[in-house]
Image: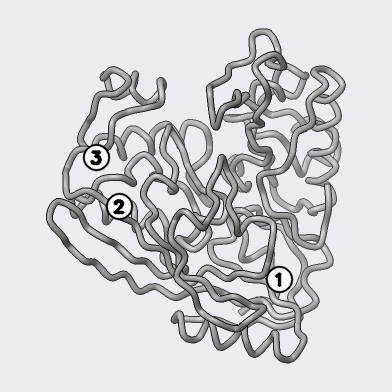
Amino acid sequence: MSDLLADLTTLRLGGPARRLVTATSTGELVELVRGADAAGERVLLVGGGSNLVIGDDGWDGVVVLVRSDAVSVDIREGTVAVTADAGVSWDSLVARSVDEGWSGLAAMSGIPGSTGGTPVQNVGAYGSEVADVISSVRVLDRETGGVEDWPAERCAFAFRTSAFKHTDRYVVLSVTFDLLLSDEAPPARYAELARRLEVEIGDTAPSARVREVVLDLRRSKGMVLDDRDPDTWSVGSFFVNMLVDEADVPPGCPHWPTDGRMKLSAAWLIENAGFGKGFGLDRPPGTVAVSTKHTLALTNRGGATTAQLLDLARLIRGGVEARYGLRLFPEAHLIGCAL
């Protein structure tokens, strides 16, 4: 097994780890983290590696590869409780939910990474987010060493954030989703998705059709991993779509009411600040660039360094701030580096 973290991240960036271990079950994950904490060893958890920007110097500690993969199913009257270990591939779980007739996840098809990462930043897409369907999260509290079951209310879910996002105190061990037993997806909330489905906002469509359309949409934006396509060698959306007061929405910028404020299109801000699709491809050394398919994705074109990627991110952030007076923040988790 390579000790280069670049081999474990979708950005294909990151220096060496001092030590790598693998947890193939929830019990092993708890044991490995507790042991490292007791020894005073720094811990980095890596699932799918799809939201990590790791510094070129790597990680001076233990990297725990989260590969626990158990899924349990409790069918009730009209609903099903699905509990997935942290290491379960997220898109595999979504695909199974569609095949089994469990309604609630289809609009989040194609999102890379593992299930354990989904509650951390309240993953979502096309009008859905995991907070809509999570009933509880099992966590290891690294301060007490205890394992706790948190109801959704305790997780403090909000737009792309949660009680887990800005702390390493808690390790997500498994997630339980309450889904409907139905072949129909929840009502469409996102205009682009509804249009492609040929339904009105608030109408439903079969989950299988929703998954098909979402995967097509994500592929068109370079947001489905493909070893042959450098546009997908990214962390997906590098910057988060920010929330502002309605009075602060730039003229012409797409925006949507979210959590009592307005969510702005960071992709629009980036493009209209002068950083269009493919920006950077013609700039030496040409190893990092904005995706040619979507301006929210910053990509490693092969042979890049994390330092180069962050230089590009700083250039874009500064350009947007100079043009609109708005400061972009990374959606990705930066490890051993800073923006």
* Above or below, comparing residue 53 to residue 66 in the picture: above
Q: In the displayed image of the protein, which residue is found farthest to the top? A: 251
The N terminus - image quarter:
bottom right
Q: Which residue is mark 3?
A: 207
On screen, residue 302 versus residue 75, left or right, reads right
Q: Nearer the viewer, mark 1 or mark 3?
A: 3
Colour scheme in use: one colour
Distance between the alpha carbons at the discs numbered 2 and 1: 30 Å
| Residue nearest the viewer, comparing 218 with 262 | 262
Residue 170 is marked as: none
Q: Which residue is mark 2?
A: 95
* Above or below, comparing residue 33 to residue 136 in the picture: below
Which residue type carries mark 1? Leu
Q: Work out whether mark 1 precedes mark 3 in sequence or the reverse, and give the earlier one.
A: 1
Secondary element under disc 1, as helix, strand or loop, is: loop
Q: Work out whether mark 2 precedes mark 1 in sequence or the reverse, and give the earlier one.
A: 1
Q: Position of residue 215 (x, y in %)?
A: 38, 38
Q: Which residue is mark 1?
A: 4
**Quadrant position of residue 336:** bottom right
On screen, residue 53 versus residue 91, left or right, reads right
Q: In the displayed image of the protein, which residue is found farthest to the front? A: 153
**Quadrant position of residue 55:** bottom right
Secondary element under disc 3, as helix, strand or loop, is: helix
Secondary element under disc 2, as helix, strand or loop, is: helix
